[in-house]
């Protein structure tokens, strides 16, 4: 079973190369309920040259793979962010009870961040942590109406480090 999965991943990467990083990033953001950490580890494992010295391998990881995956995450993030930015409050009021989310909780969290002036560092830090789903943060940013520029640059930079 595992061997077949590895063969499928290898053939997919052989067909699409580093473009796969963009596709995985975009898919991870849109389908945020699927854990992506394993996909990004597989990308590094299969796309980076195992015989490359440390610094060129690091440059390739941050360059080709990291930047393309981050653009995919950013593009998918804009879709999720926009959906919840413009339709967030009605969505939460109507469907929030199914995931134990109340609008008052969102407002309280946002007020705490704004009072302490910590919204940008927190956004950047959460983007870097591999255990926290990136898509959930895009939803939260849309709901809290974080400025698009702050959302975009924290998503892009945090995603490069994360990937």
Image: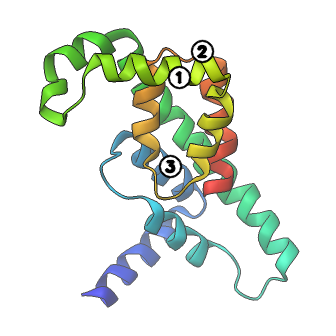
* Label 3 vs label 1, nearer the camera: 1
- Report the residue at 42% width, 19% height from top: 108
What scheme was used to colour the molecule? rainbow
Question: Does the image show residue 162?
Answer: yes
Q: From the viewer's perspective, is 1 left or right of 77?
A: left
Q: Are marks 3 and 1 in contact (CB under 8 Å)?
A: no
For the residues bearing labels 1 and 2, Cβ distance under 8 angstroms: no
Judging by the rendered image, the residue that carries numbered circle 2 is 147
Residue picked out by circle 1: 112
User: Could you tell me if residue 143 is visible in this image?
Assistant: no
Q: Residues within 10 Å of mark 2 (few under 14, many from 20)?
A: few
Task: Looking at the image, tell me whether mark 3 or mark 1 is earlier in sequence order.
Answer: 3
Cα–Cα span, label 2 and label 3: 22 Å
| Dot 3 alpha-carbon crowd within 10 angstroms: few under 14, some 14 to 19, many 20 or more | many
**Which residue is located at x 50 percent, y 69 percent?**
13
Question: Disc 2 on helix, strand or loop?
Answer: loop
Towards the viewer: 126 or 161: 126
Residue at 70% x, 86% y: name it: 50
Q: Quadrant of the N terminus?
A: bottom left
Provide the secondary structure element on which disc 1 rests.
Answer: helix
Q: Which residue is mark 3?
A: 25
Front one among 152 and 22: 152
Q: Position of residue 75 (x, y in %)?
A: 52, 33
Q: Position of residue 110 (x, y in %)?
A: 49, 20
Q: Position of residue 139 (x, y in %)?
A: 40, 29
């Amino acid at each position: 079973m595992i061997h077949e999965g590895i063969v499928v991943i290898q053939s997919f990467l052989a067909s699409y190369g580093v473009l796969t990083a963009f596709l995985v990033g975009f898919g991870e953001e849109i389908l945020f309920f699927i854990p992506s950490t394993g996909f990004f580890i597989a990308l590094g494992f299969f796309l980076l040259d195992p015989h490359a010295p440390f610094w060129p391998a690091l440059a390739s990881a941050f360059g080709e793979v990291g930047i393309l995956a981050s653009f995919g995450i950013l593009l998918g993030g804009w879709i999720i962010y926009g959906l919840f930015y413009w339709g967030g409050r009605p969505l939460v009021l109507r469907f929030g009870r199914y995931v134990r989310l109340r609008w008052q909780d969102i407002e309280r969290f946002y007020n705490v961040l704004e009072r302490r002036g910590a919204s940008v560092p927190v956004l950047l830090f959460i983007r870097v942590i591999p255990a926290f789903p990136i898509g959930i943060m895009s939803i939260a940013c849309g709901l809290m109406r974080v400025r698009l520029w702050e959302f975009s640059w924290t998503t892009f930079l945090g995603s490069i480090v994360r990937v």
